[in-house]
Image (tube, helix red, strand yellow):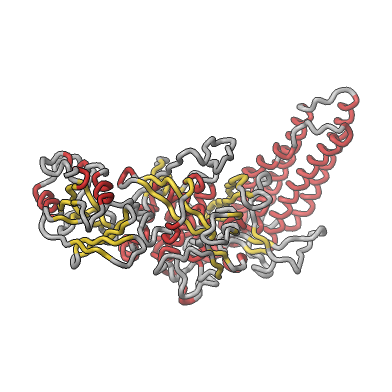
């Protein structure tokens, strides 16, 4: 007999916590353990061993596929197991070679064709009886490591979803390959957190906040392991199994900086003719990112529809409030969640994340409103199906199908709580009454700190009329009022986004910025702080405008466009000083002191930086003779304009200063 047409195997089932147990036993085993199995383990393995023989009821390609898998290390030191393979069932089924293999205690093992309703049943008797089974790729996102985190010790490692939650109090932050991936993972974790822990009330939030770590029992009660298998035959995580009829494209389509087709990018020289393979960990991270941030444009059609809109997170800067550790971060961003009471707003009783769907999505694109907050956090903007090769530790993702998914029918300002919004102004600085509020987005040059009023402060007169900060900040302010969090705490807003080209189909840049979020500023309910911060931003704008005018006048006089743009030396260097300015304002407000020292320090920083940038630009100019005289004249005009802006700033802000001025000021 052809040796490839028969193979000895041991059958395993996967437990809810991701361990492997021989069928018919209750002893979990580590298949990577090189030590010789104990006697009770050998008895369990013996009871679950069968011989697979190809025949009318078992296709030869299935037996060959099983025989091609490596012998587990646990078996290699045994005199009778050293040629056995391990076959692992997840959810009583697995897929290989166009077949679905099932196992249950009543029928034993039986084989069905993929997408077929007829089944061939193969009885399972004692060890040695001819039987059938199949090995399949499986990657459990609950227990297998795939989320990159930085611990309090500064070490970077990867954890599964369950371990991320239970170790959140020892994790500093999540940090992934790109800012968009980090944002997408935060949104996924927040949806997961809401479904596990709520919290359904402020009291429940307080209990979680004061606990040393997030409770295990609540988490394990929620978990449904088959819902988090990246390669599940019927409901792969965040994917559409019914796309199996389409030929997969290169896995490079998952990764924006990898070349696709014949296009070679500046930093990557992979083309479609090259084989690109991703680990399951990499593929899972990019899958989550694609659903949140995939650009628009033409996709592979399932039938006819190739057009896709930008995934939701392309429309705004994703704001994450960061605490001292990931546990704090999750809770600071977790709104009171009670769908049966429409909390948060626009969340209905049937709200649920994508993994709680009873059936997989239709392969056809559709359009609908969001059922609520966790539905929006895990929005299925694309239909995706990963194509895997190998099994166990040898599993790789070497292909993917991406088609248009579900279009979001929503007004983001009414439903998106991880973003800030503002109403645009006219040329005179007045709000455009008929214009819709726009989300705050990141600019590749000018920092997001310029939107600190919209990000941090409540609208004193009517919150939501002309601006709206991320919802978590309003909740933090209320919790501070009730002394549930420190009144003088300073958290960090991390803002993530990406810039697309004019057609919104190609990613041009990823961006990530941070802004301090002092609790005293979040709690402020007067217009003074908003005015001070607004004038501080206006001072920076005026200085930047003076620099651009200085450069433009010189270029106009001498038609010289060879000098570098002056903006690039100015705006990026203001982010840190402005952060210090915000912290100083918060300290002053918390302690009842005057804001004047912070105002004066900020004015000095802006003036010094703008003057330094101008001086360095002059020093680097190739001007000679008459051009040097003209350059000196424009330089003098710049300094005069800068001094005027500083005087105006002080005159305008003095009316908003509160508190007692320190004696040494």
Q: Is residue 483 something that shows in the picture?
A: no
Horizontal and vertical percent for residue 295? Answer: 59, 53
For residue 204, above or below residue 293 = below
User: Is residue 509 toward the left or the right of residue 99 in the image?
Assistant: right
Can you give x and y, in whole percent of width and height, for residue 69 in the image? 26, 44
All told, the count of numbered labels is 0
Residue 126 visible at all:
yes
Residue at horizontal 60 percent and vertical 47 percent from the top: 507
Task: Give the camera-side residue of 244 and 574.
Answer: 244
Residue at image coords 61%, 48%: 506
Q: Which image quarter is the N terminus in?
A: top left
Residue 340 image offset from top left, x and y in percent: 46, 76
In x, y percent, where is residue 153?
Answer: 40, 41
Displayed quadrant of residue 548: top right
Image side of residue 61 versus residue 493, left or right: left
Q: Which residue lies furthest to the top in this view?
A: 625
**Residue located at (58% from left, 38% from top):** 265
Is 585 situated left or right of 621 in this image? Answer: left
At x 54% / y 67%, what residue is drawn?
Answer: 366
Q: Which of 28 and 459 is in front in this view?
A: 28
Taking 625 as reference, is 420 above or below it?
below
């Amino acid at each position: 007999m052809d040796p490839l047409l028969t193979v000895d195997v041991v059958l395993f089932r996967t437990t809810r916590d991701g361990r492997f147990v021989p069928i018919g036993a209750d002893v979990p085993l580590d298949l990577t353990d090189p030590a010789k199995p104990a006697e009770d383990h050998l008895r369990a393995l013996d009871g679950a061993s069968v011989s697979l023989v190809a025949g009318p009821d078992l296709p030869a390609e299935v037996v060959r596929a099983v025989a091609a898998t490596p012998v587990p290390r646990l078996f290699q030191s045994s005199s009778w197991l050293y040629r056995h393979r391990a076959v692992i069932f997840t959810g009583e089924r697995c897929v290989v070679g166009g077949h679905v293999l099932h196992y249950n205690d009543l029928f034993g093992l039986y084989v069905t064709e993929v997408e077929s309703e007829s089944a061939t049943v193969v009885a399972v008797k004692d060890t040695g009886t001819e039987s059938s089974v199949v090995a399949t790729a499986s990657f459990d996102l609950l227990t297998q490591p795939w989320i990159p985190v930085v611990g309090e010790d500064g070490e970077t490692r990867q954890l599964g979803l369950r371990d991320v939650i239970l170790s959140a109090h020892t994790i500093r932050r999540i940090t992934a390959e790109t800012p968009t991936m980090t944002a997408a993972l935060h949104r996924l974790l927040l949806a997961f957190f809401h479904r596990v822990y709520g919290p359904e009330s402020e009291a429940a939030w307080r209990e979680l906040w004061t606990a040393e770590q997030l409770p295990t029992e609540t988490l394990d009660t929620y978990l449904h392991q088959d819902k988090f298998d990246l390669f599940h035959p019927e409901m792969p995580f965040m994917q559409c199994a019914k796309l199996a009829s389409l030929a997969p494209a290169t896995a490079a389509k998952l990764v924006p900086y990898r070349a696709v087709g014949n296009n070679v990018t500046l930093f990557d020289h992979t083309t479609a003719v090259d084989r690109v393979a991703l680990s399951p960990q990499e593929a899972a991270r990019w899958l989550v990112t694609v659903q949140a941030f995939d650009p628009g444009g033409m996709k592979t059609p399932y039938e006819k529809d190739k057009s896709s809109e930008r995934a939701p997170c392309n429309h705004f800067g994703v704001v994450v409030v960061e605490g001292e550790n990931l546990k704090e971060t999750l809770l600071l961003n977790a709104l009171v969640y009670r769908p049966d009471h429409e909390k948060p707003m626009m969340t209905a009783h049937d709200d649920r994340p994508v993994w709680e769907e009873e059936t997989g999505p239709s392969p056809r694109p559709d359009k609908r409103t969001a059922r609520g907050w966790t539905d929006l956090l895990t929005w299925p903007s694309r239909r995706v199906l990963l194509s895997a090769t190998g099994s166990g530790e040898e599993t790789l993702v070497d292909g993917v199908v991406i088609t248009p998914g579900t279009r979001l029918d929503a007004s983001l300002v009414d439903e998106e709580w991880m973003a800030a919004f503002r109403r645009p102004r006219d040329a005179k600085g007045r709000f455009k009454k008929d214009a819709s509020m726009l989300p705050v987005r990141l600019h590749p040059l000018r920092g997001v700190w310029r939107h600190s009023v919209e990000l941090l402060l409540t609208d004193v007169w009517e919150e939501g009329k002309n601006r709206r900060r991320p919802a978590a900040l309003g909740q933090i302010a209320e919790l501070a009022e009730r002394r549930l969090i420190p009144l003088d705490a300073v958290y960090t807003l991390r803002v993530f986004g990406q810039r697309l080209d004019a057609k919104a189909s190609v990613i041009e840049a990823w961006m990530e910025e941070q802004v301090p979020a002092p609790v005293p500023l979040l709690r402020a309910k007067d217009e003074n702080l908003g005015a001070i911060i607004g004038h501080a931003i206006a001072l920076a704008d005026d200085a930047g405008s003076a620099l651009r005018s200085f450069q433009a006048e010189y270029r106009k006089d001498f038609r010289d466009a060879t000098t570098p743009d002056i903006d690039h030396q100015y705006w990026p260097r203001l982010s840190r000083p402005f952060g210090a300015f915000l912290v100083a304002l918060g300290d002053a407000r918390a302690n009842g002191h005057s804001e004047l020292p912070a105002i004066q320090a900020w004015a000095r920083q802006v003036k010094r930086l703008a003057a330094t940038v101008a001086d360095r630009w002059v020093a680097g100019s190739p001007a000679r003779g008459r051009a040097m005289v003209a350059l000196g004249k424009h330089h003098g005009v710049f300094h005069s304009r800068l001094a005027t802006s500083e005087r105006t700033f002080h005159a305008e802000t003095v009316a908003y200063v509160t508190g007692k001025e320190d004696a040494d000021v």
